[in-house]
Image (cartoon, helix red, strand yellow):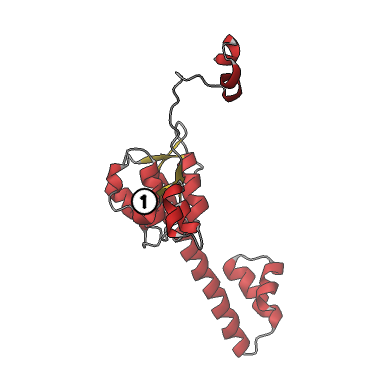
């Protein structure tokens, strides 16, 4: 403003302010994206060493406004999606967490892609974001996809175990490798190359 008006003189010109100018405060907030306890200093004075007691009152101390999921006990006080993000981070070690939060929030619960990306980045949750509506993901669909992925993993593991059991059984009977490969191709619809990999 003063630069456009060119109304500053002498010391005012150097500072860019007049004696009547007012400023707005800037509040800096530090967000800690982990679920463990913050153990680093939160005040400048905590980083001083060998400071004589008489000097303390002359030194300006600066503290950080810290938000860490670990210290939040009532997430309902947060009114934005930050609530879901921080609560998920804090509770990330709970079994079937996403299903629990879905039950607590109801069928209409949704989150933005940005919030889910933050959760995935800092917790490794792997929540899928391939189906969106207006930039948001219906979390009921996300939980359903996790169920389906779990079923698929279970079937894949069961299939893998079946293949191993068959190979070991046939080998114990001294069945030739060529015959074992043929059995795998027939029973599990494997390619000859894939079957050979299992046998070898």
The residue that appears at 36% across and 44% down in the rendered structure is 83
Q: Quadrant of residue 93?
A: bottom left
Q: In terms of secondary structure, where does tag 1 sit? A: helix
Quadrant housing the N terminus: top right
Q: Quadrant of residue 110?
A: top left
Q: Quadrant of residue 77?
A: top left
> Where is residue 66 shown, x and y percent of the image?
41, 49
Characterize the local packing of mark 1: few (<14), some (14-19) or many (20 or more) Cα atoms within 10 angstroms: many
> Where is residue 57 shown, x and y percent of the image?
41, 50
Q: Quick check: 138 left or right of 182?
A: left
Quick one: 19 or 87, which is closer to the camera? 19
Quick one: 183 or 56, which is closer to the camera? 56
The residue that disc 1 covers is 87
> Where is residue 12 shown, x and y percent of the image?
56, 20
Q: Quick check: 55 left or right of 192?
A: left
The residue that appears at 49% across and 51% down in the rendered structure is 120
Quadrant housing the C terminus: bottom right
Is residue 63 in view?
A: no
> Where is residue 199 shown, x and y percent of the image?
67, 78
The residue that appears at 39% across and 42% down in the rendered structure is 82
Quick one: 170 or 135, which is closer to the camera? 135
Is residue 78 in view?
A: yes
Q: Quick check: 75 left or right of 119?
A: left
Q: Residue furthest bottom?
A: 173
Q: Is residue 78 above or below residue 148?
A: above
How many numbered callouts? 1
């Amino acid at each position: 403003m003063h630069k456009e008006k060119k109304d500053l003189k002498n010391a005012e010109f150097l500072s860019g302010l007049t004696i009547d100018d007012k400023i707005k405060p800037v509040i800096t907030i530090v967000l800690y994206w982990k679920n463990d306890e913050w153990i680093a200093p939160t005040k400048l004075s905590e980083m001083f060493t060998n400071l004589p007691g008489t000097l303390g009152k002359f030194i300006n101390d600066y503290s950080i406004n810290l938000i860490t999921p670990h210290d939040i006990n009532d997430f309902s006080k947060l009114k934005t999606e930050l609530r879901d993000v921080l609560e998920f981070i804090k509770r990330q070690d709970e079994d079937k967490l996403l299903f629990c939060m879905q039950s607590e929030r109801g069928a209409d619960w949704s989150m933005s892609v940005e919030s889910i990306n933050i959760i995935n980045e800092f917790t490794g949750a792997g929540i899928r974001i391939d189906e969106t509506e207006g930039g948001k993901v219906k979390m009921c669909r996300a939980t359903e996809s996790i169920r389906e992925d779990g079923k698929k993993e279970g079937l894949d593991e069961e299939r893998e175990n079946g293949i191993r059991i068959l190979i070991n059984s046939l080998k114990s009977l001294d069945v030739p490798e060529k015959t074992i490969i043929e059995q795998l191709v027939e029973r599990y619809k494997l390619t000859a190359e894939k079957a050979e990999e299992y046998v070898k």
